[in-house]
Image (tube, coloured by chain):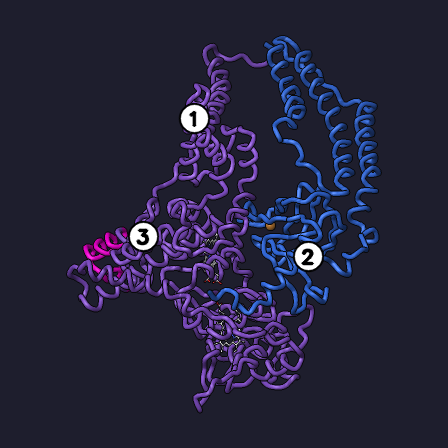
Chain colours: A blue, B purple
Amino acid sequence: MRLLYALLLLLVPVLGVYTFVTADQHGWWFPDNVSTYGPSIDRLFYLIQAMVAITFIGTEVLLAWFMYKYSKRRDDRGVFSHGNHKLEMVWTAIPAVLLLVIAFAQMGTWAEIKFQKGFPDGEFSMDRPIAEVVASQFDWRAIYPGEDGVIGTMDDLENPFEFVVPVDEDVVFNLRSRDVIHAFFVPQFRLKQDALPGHTIPVWFNATEEGVYDLICAELCGWGHYKMAGRVRVVSRPEYDQFLADLDQEWFSNGMEEVQ
Amino acid sequence: MVASYPRGAGSAPRLRSLALPTASLLALFAACHMEAKNPTLQFSLSTAVGGAAEVDEEGDPLLPPDVQAHIQGALEMLCGTPSAPQFMVTEDWYDDGFNPNYPQYPADDMGSGELSDEELEAIAASNELRFRLQLELAAEGRYDEVRIPSHMVDLQAYYDDLRADLAAERAAAEAGEGDPEELEFLEGELSEGAFVNWYPTLRESAEMYRQQCLHCHGVEGGGDGTTADFLNPRPRDYRHGTFKFTAMNAKARPRREDLYRILEQGVTGTAMPSFRRFSRAEVWGLVDYVRLLAVRGEVERDLAYTYRNDFEGDGVLPLSNVLAAYETVWDKWMSAPVNYLAFDGEIPAATPELIARGREIYFDAQSGNCQSCHGDYGLGDGPAAYELNEDGTFKLDENGDRISAYADDWGHPIYPRNIARGIIRGGKRPIDIYRRIYAGINGTPMPGIGESKNADGDPLLSDEDMWALVHFTRSLTERPEPIVHASPDHGGGHADDHGAAADTHEETH
Ligand SMILES: [Cu+2]
């Protein structure tokens, strides 16, 4: 009987590992990365994944083995022990070291993505962002600065739901929220950034492939959170310019083109 | 061993310990195999003012039950039920070949031409986007794996038919018979046509409405869904046929395009979100369903009114009257394009001079007089919008809030917008704001001044003045500081405490 239970417990790591190994085949793994800094995020993920995997398998196997070995026998008396100083030192020190490893390993990536002094400074920069993305319960809209390049002025152009950007270019945008905390999350870009009410947060990315990507709110923001979806459309430069021109035309239209 | 159990009792806990996990496993299993059952929805009559099920103070219905049943039956004949929504086609329509149930899609001629070719192309393009995964699967011939969104009953049926036909055609081809052209058509249709040319029926749109809109707008479109009580402003009650953010003059019914635009843009600053995440075809379908609910609601109000006033509450309304009411309501919707409002000319540039002129009009009691409602700073705190004490100060309720002097058409208190917050619900494009100011906002006290005349019968505002006002309004929405404040320091108006005004009546969104 105790063998059965120990084996049952062993099923947890076995099934767990199996799911991970086959996840890719079922399409449960990461969506393809299409951003320049995606690979370094993924590397960090795999580093942590490896640590966790080793720990997980080790502890689970040990657990199953202990369960088998030390399972209660009818006439045994419980043994009371009061800890093992050496053992405790070891299992405190190892995670501490691992945490330090993670802390050092992520520094470069974090600096690259979030440090403002490392922000791109090309056509789009912190001073001249491509657009402002505004989150509100429960939708997204992109506000392009219009001709003057300044957001918040009368020639701004608004596009609900869809944020259009050029491919292979460093794109800097401002993230804002109109009500509560939301988070801008595009899994393919490996980019997640909270939007805080009252703050204007600069964010950058460089998308390497044209396409349409889901923009998801990754912060539980109220009852409609589940449907707070948007879209990022990555297009070629000419298409992007055309998009802006069309938007401009629609925005400053006098409505006559609709008269049949 | 410390304790010893009396024999017999020992087996009970063990049994239970096995029973519990087994039961929960079974429950889990059962849950996985359970289909969500959609309740069958029914349209009920409106209890709102003017509705057929309105009651008096004592709670007695204003119309007797048999009359209500009559109206209910008439409405079902005209507009169907939530599970089978359908417009009745009148004889005249039939003769004219007009059928609002298929506004644009009798299979090959693309219908009554309400959608232009470009629009249909755009629909195909957005369908392609929406169904891209399915299209890829179908292109690889993996027809079994194609998943069609659950509410698209008719597409699913069509798709299943195609698959069956294809199987039969292939078998025939293998046997050396069959028609290669037919085979090609089926393969093409399966891998593309079924999805790309898809357009929802009213039934599919009703299901979509149930999933996406009902919890706010209610089964009958009465703006009384379960979420509605928590929202400010409340979701629109379509049953008056009154829509706020349209391109229409003279409080006319909106065009389909106007409703489409609202669904695509959402109403910023309110709970009404953008629905661009759905394909264009789906959004057009929702527009058609909203129109059905609006027509149904209007006919209901019309019939209730007739019963109350011309029949003193009893007697049976002849069919001809019912049809007349239906046609009158439809005529209003059909005549929408006549009232389309646009500006025939080039929009003047927003120069500082023009904006300054706009500010004058904003404050001028003889022409714009916007300040009376929207206040000196555009904060929506003008004296005309609230109940005042004798000494001209604001009356306050028990919470210390000002009391609105107006109710909107739906009977809710309404406040002038705080324009300086920069949130313009009906769209921030110049032409949107032009339309709001020219034609007013339907169902609210916000007046349209585009066609107002002065004492001599001349237009109150020239085109340039209108645009001055539009640009001034737009300038109020600028960040961080408007270029030109609507403030007394810049002339006009009377002194007020800016800070105090700013936070007394903030909107809740
Ligand atoms: Cu959110």
Q: Which residue is mark 2?
A: A241
Q: Which residue is mark 1?
A: B169
**What residue do we see at 57% from left, 35% from top?**
B136
Marks 2 and 1, how far apart at CA:
48 Å
* Marks 2 and 1 in Cβ contact (< 8 Å): no
**What residue do we see at 66% from left, 45% from top?**
A185
Query: Who is closer to the viewer here, B241 or A165?
Result: A165
- Which circle, 2 or 1, is nearer the viewer? 1
Q: Which residue is mark 3?
A: B87
* Marks 2 and 3 in Cβ contact (< 8 Å): no
Check residue A189 for magenta coloring.
Answer: no
Chain of residue at mark 2: A
In the picture, measured across the screen, residue B155 lies left or right of residue B266, that is left
Marks 3 and 1, how far apart at CA:
38 Å
Q: Which quarter of the image is occupied by the N terminus of chain B?
A: top right
Give the amino acid type for the residue marked by disc 1 in the picture. Answer: Glu
Check residue B75 for magenta coloring.
Answer: yes
Give the amino acid type for the residue marked by disc 2 in the picture. Answer: Asp
- Quick one: SS at disc 1? helix
Query: Which residues fall within the magenta stretch?
Result: B57-76
Q: Position of residue B16 (x, y in %)?
A: 47, 19
In the picture, measured across the screen, residue B356 lies left or right of residue B508, that is right
Chain-order first, disc 3 or disc 1: 3
Q: Which quarter of the image is occupied by the C terminus of chain B?
A: bottom right
Give the amino acid type for the residue marked by disc 3 in the picture. Answer: Phe
User: Are both tags, 3 and 1, on one chain?
Assistant: yes
User: Are both tags, 2 and 1, on one chain?
Assistant: no
Chain of residue at mark 1: B
Query: Who is closer to the viewer here, B496 or A89?
Result: B496
Q: Is residue B20 above or below residue A104?
A: above
